[in-house]
Amino acid sequence: MTNLSPLQIERLKYQPKLPSSLANGINHLVSQEGSATEAVANKEEIKALFKNTYGKPTVTFQTSTESVASKERNVGVILSGGQAPGGHNVIAGLYDALKQANPNNNLYGFLGGPSGIIDGKYVEFNDEFINDYRNTGGFDIIGSGRTKLETEDQFQKALGVCKKLNISAVVIIGGDDSNTNAALLAEWFVANGADIQVIGCPKTIDGDLKNEQIEISFGFDTATKTYAELIGNIERDANSAKKYWHFVKIMGRSASHVALEAALQTQPNITLISEEVEQKKMSLASIIDYMVDIIVKRADMGKNFGIAVIPEGLIEFIPEMKSMIANLNDIMAELESDPAFVNAPTIREKFDIVENRLSEENAKVYNSLPAIIKGQLLADRDPHGNVQVSKIETEKLLIEMISQKLEEMKLEGSYIGKFSAQAHFFGYEGRCAFPSNFDADYCYSLGFNAFALINFGLTGYLSSVRNLTEPANDWIAGGVPLTMMMNMEKRHGEMKPVIKKALVELDGPVFKKLEENREDWALNDRYLFPGAIQYFGPSSVCDITTVTLQLESQEKLDKSRLARV
Ligand code: FBP
């Protein structure tokens, strides 16, 4: 590799840490089984759909003094969905474990996401290739994609490609949707007598692939630290110039974990949490009222500036919008192949076609939106039928509505301030950052552990590394059956088995921390400036993980202490 920055050169030398159970070597492990598992909901439906892979036990690995010989294997790996810092280290950990187990083993990387395994597009890894990507951000090592693996034809093609390369296991690195694909593929391989295992790895900056066994998805730590640095910089700017309100929309397709974590790290004046909006059934008008109230109070104190953090998925959680978008998603699934819609000469005509099909109530909501947002709501759905919220400028919608309301208040004489706003969207800025030490270690461990699951002959499992607020040495490595995380949800107008997303829990310690402080943060400027991610130096600075994980782990600890008393 040429053109390396000084930090790149340093990071290539970083040696990621492994849990002590894995550090003694891949051939020195024993697995311990937990009890049989069940799906989180719709147990009977999930069981019927995953006849061969349902109900398996969780497993944990421990070091063994005996060495177990490892048979020769070829493994394939896929990066799926949005980029998340650390993906390259998952592959590096997998590669190192695989070569340690047996130097004749081979690792193939499928190119461009799940479509690579269908189209037979791949590369074979070797030391030189892998070494260039250690501890780097991005997914450029093999690329990623969002093709959904679900049809018989796709599975047959994947089988053909695996047979050709003599691949006996596939690792899918992805979020909830991609790991749903992994579960479907694992089940299909078993049901069709193909001796090919499938293992998932929990990736997504959104932080919504988590449960009792999966404490955090990789990438969340680095992405939130990156956004927190940027928000801190903006807070400093706002506090210096004292003339702008900054509206910062932050990625997170559905759940608000990223916005919440970034807010806890920076203490902005306003933080919206989509899950709260939904639970309190807050209409768009009431969200505007809430924000305007803080803007006016601050203006009365002579402060015509501030920072508002807005989760990317907000629009889908506002009740009237949620209903309209659900209606719109069903309509768009039909319109995608309707020539009258596809070939409509103007956007105005597209609006008309859509409005005529929406229910009366939903058409009213759709119509009330500015044309730019209406257009953005019609953009292509992702392969899972979801609206692409990253393309909807909610931050601008809020600014426009707030400006209008403040104008009205000015005319009435109830507002005398000056409102000048700047809109930001932080998403792509954080998804490919150099992984933090935490993500570098966690990802390497997840990849290494994925090979341990393969070596023990398991399929339909998600690589799990837990106890993450402790030093890496004490992390617990093992696996969780993917079916354990599943329930039935509507996709493209049909009920499908999917991994359940973990949304922000409003009675959990993380949201409570915001709730307890937000009044104070709204009016008094308690900005925190976290600065850039630290890769070197005291471990209390460079190795600590998110506030979210620390608060959640502390709560678990308190609960288990209480249970023992
Ligand atoms: P994954 O769930 O696949 O990890 O992707 C998450 C995400 O980064 C969201 O935060 C965002 O809404 C979306 O991807 C953007 O997708 P795209 O990369 O296709 O623009």
Image: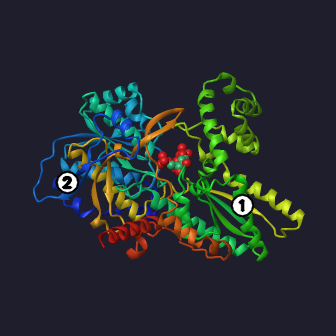
Q: Do the numbered discs 2 and 1 sit on residues whose CB atoms are within 8 Å?
A: no
Q: Where is residue 86 in the image (x, y as percent from the top left)?
A: 41, 55
Extreme-top residue of the structure: 339
Residue type, label 1: Gln
Determine whether, in the image, residue 124 is placed left or right of residue 384: left
Q: Which of 22 and 320 is in front in this view?
A: 320
Q: Position of residue 317 (x, y in %)?
A: 60, 50
Q: Which residue does the image show at 57% across and 68% down from the upper left?
A: 515
Kindly state the secondary structure of the residue where label 1 is placed.
Answer: strand
Task: Work out whether mark 2 precedes mark 1 in sequence or the reverse, and give the earlier one.
Answer: 2
Q: Mark 1 points at which residue?
A: 422
The residues bearing labels 2 and 1 have C-alpha atoms spaced at a distance of 54 Å
Location of residue 473 with respect to 209 vertically, above or below:
below
Q: Which of 341 and 359 is in front in this view?
A: 359
CB at disc 1 and ligand 1 closer than 8 Å: no
Kindly state the secondary structure of the residue where label 2 is placed.
Answer: strand
Determine whether, in the image, residue 239 is placed left or right of residue 446: right
| Residue neighbourhood size for the residue with mark 2, other residues' Cα within 10 Å, grouped as few (<14), some (14–19), many (≥20) | few
Q: In which quadrant is the C terminus drawn?
A: bottom left
Q: Which quadrant of the structure image shows residue 276?
A: bottom right
Label ID, residue 32: 2
Q: Position of residue 147 (x, y in %)?
A: 46, 35
Tell me the mark number nearer the camera, choosing from 2 and 1: 2
